[in-house]
């Protein structure tokens, strides 16, 4: 698996917890991972600091505490792809559109340039990916915790430290490249105080 990441967990946070995954296409839900030939390329966005209340307002905005992204935040730095930063060893940069990163990952895996990929395939990729502006634009979401359950988990971590880093993944797959998945990781440093 190829990895591009900024920092490890911040010095205030020693705990990483994945609270949700979304897909552009429904995944294989076999009990065992049978797609052993699938290769992954991961992008890790720079973490966002937010309070527990902000986190709740963004991801658990209904009165029942069930996962629901608040569309008011669709253009915010918290869930909009074009406002994400990737930091590597040389610099920090804004991603603008995910289409360039997906195509670049395919180029790396196939060891070709985009000029060597079928033009119609590239156009279809761009058309599909340019529709995805934020996490609000993705339909297949799996979140297995209510906010009340997350609060219980948080209380265990808050006894050890005053923050936790939460991870939300977007996994992109395309039928033209069945054995490759591109993973975009959003990170949230949630402070309990």
Image (spheres, helix red, strand yellow):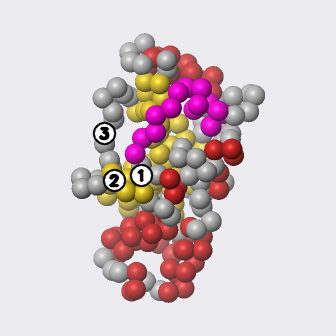
**Residue that appears at 51% across and 75% down:** 176
Residue 88 drawn at (x, y percent)? 29, 53
Q: Mark 2 points at which residue?
A: 92
Q: Give the crowd class for mark 1: few <14, some 14-19, many >=20 residues within 10 Å.
A: many
Q: Can residue 33 be seen in this view?
A: no
Give the number of marks.
3
Q: Is residue 49 magenta?
A: yes
Magenta segment boundaries in residue numbering? 46-60
CA–CA distance in space, label 1 to label 2: 6 Å
Q: Which residue position is annotated with label 3?
A: 8
Circles 1 and 2, Cβ within 8 Å, touching? The answer is yes
Q: Position of residue 105 (x, y in %)?
A: 38, 67
Q: Distance between the residues labelled 1 and 3?
A: 14 Å
Q: On the rendered structure, is 73 left or right of 17?
A: right
Could you say whether the residue bearing mark 1 is in a helix, strand or loop? Answer: strand
Q: Name the residue under label 1.
A: 85
């Amino acid at each position: 698996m190829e990895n591009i990441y900024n920092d490890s967990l911040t010095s205030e946070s020693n705990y990483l917890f994945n609270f949700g995954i979304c897909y552009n296409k429904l995944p294989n839900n076999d009990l065992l991972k049978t797609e052993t030939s699938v290769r992954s390329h991961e992008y890790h966005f720079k973490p966002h600091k937010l309070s527990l209340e902000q986190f709740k307002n963004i991801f658990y905005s209904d009165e029942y505490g069930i996962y629901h992204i608040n569309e008011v935040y669709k253009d915010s730095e918290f869930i909009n792809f074009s406002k994400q930063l990737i930091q590597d060893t040389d610099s920090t940069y804004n991603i603008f559109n995910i289409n360039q990163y997906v195509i670049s990952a395919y180029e790396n895996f196939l060891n070709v340039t985009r000029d060597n990929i079928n033009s119609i395939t590239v156009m279809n990729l761009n058309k599909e990916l340019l529709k995805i502006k934020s996490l609000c634009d993705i339909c297949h979401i799996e979140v297995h915790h209510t906010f009340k359950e997350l609060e219980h988990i948080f209380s265990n971590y808050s006894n050890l430290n005053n923050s936790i880093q939460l991870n939300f993944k977007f996994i992109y797959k395309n039928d033209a490249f069945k054995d490759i998945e591109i993973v975009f990781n959003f990170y949230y440093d949630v402070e309990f105080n």
